Image (cartoon, helix red, strand yellow):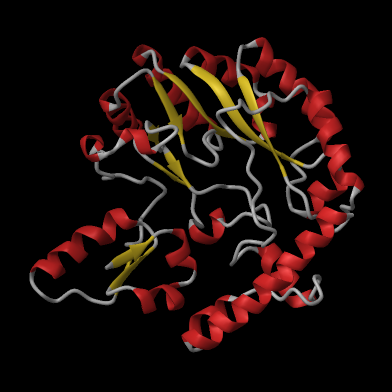
Amino acid sequence: MVLGGVHVSVLPGEAIQYADAIVIGRGESAWPQLIRDFRHGRMKRVYRKHDLADDVLAGVPAPRRDLQRNSGYRMPNTIQATRGCRRRCDFCSVTAVWPRYLKRPVADVVRDLRATPGRIVAFNDVSLVDDEEYARELFTAMIPLKKKWGGLVTADSLKNSRLLDLMVESGCVYLLIGFESGDQDTLRGIRKGFNQTAEYKDFVTMLHRRGITIQGCLVFGFDHDDKHSFDATIDLVQELGIDPASPSQPRRTAPPLPRLATPVFLTVEHDAALPGCGLPSARILGSEPVASRRTELAKRSSAWRSVLEQAASD
């Protein structure tokens, strides 16, 4: 068994206990070597990504979509042009896993788009337009493909109306935007002060005028949040006119655990901001015996369950 991905890259000490080998970081560079070693009977326990000389992520193989069972995915036709993010929001694990912002050659992305069946695709990049020059080159190359697409952008990137018009011309019909909060002090506290709450309404209006559907992401659990934050957030969504989820896309709630290796996780762990609800650290998960870790995590899971039950009854 071989394991890889975000969890394994953040907690390799835990993952290696459950696999014959693990891949840390980008799999495109490490996987071919692992396969060669396996065929020759000398597979190692740990494989790591190769360092890149610049920010160009070349040589990513085209996906074998003929092996994909499309019925198992709500959006089977996904594609990636960039990897990582230039921002440093303190609750996000992206920069902890991918510290550099990498860009695939536009020709490679267009190749994959041409090979993707159907007219609708989704970019799974977390920050697709961080590099405006690259984004312009990509969107211009996409126009002849006549695909309809959606993706993720930061709210401040919407200030550029010319880039927004080019996105529409290239087929953009849907954007996911991390609004996170309607409180500017909260945004500054999570290193996302580039979001300006006073501009939210204008951004939404600009997108709707261009026929773009908006999915807004908002976060609960900041230091200044209380039970009134839920109603305030609902009011914000209605005021902005963020498009609601369709019945076929039920809303999901993530567990109240800061992601490992993020600044907010380290802050919570250090300051003991949640008494009685300790969080599993990379040190604990990577070094303690399996039995003791399971016992500790079970206790902590019970503590979190109590917090949720109390919140629900308030």
Query: Where in the figure is residue 8, as x and y percent of width and height?
Result: 43, 66
Where in the figure is residue 265, as x and y percent of width and height? Answer: 68, 66
* Residue 92 place in picture, x, y as percent: 62, 54
Q: Quadrant of the C terminus?
A: bottom right
Q: Residue at x 29, y 37 (%)?
A: 69
Residue 279 position (above or below residue 244): below
In the image, 237: left or right of 249?
Answer: right
Which residue is found at the position 54% from the left and 42% from the top? 126
Q: Quadrant of residue 18?
A: bottom left
Residue at 47% in and 84% down: 290
Is residue 55 in view? Answer: yes
Depicted 167 relative to depicted 249: above or below: above
Would you identify the image quadrant in which residue 25 lies? bottom left
Q: Nearer the viewer, residue 249 or 267?
A: 249
Residue sitting farthest toward the left? 40
Question: 277 left or right of 293?
Answer: right
Q: Nearer the viewer, residue 17 or 104?
A: 17
One can see residue 267 in this view:
no
Between 170 and 227, the one lying in front of the other is 227
Measured from the top left, where is residue 308 in percent x and y? 76, 60
Quarter that holds the N terminus: bottom left
Q: Is residue 179 left or right of residue 8?
A: right
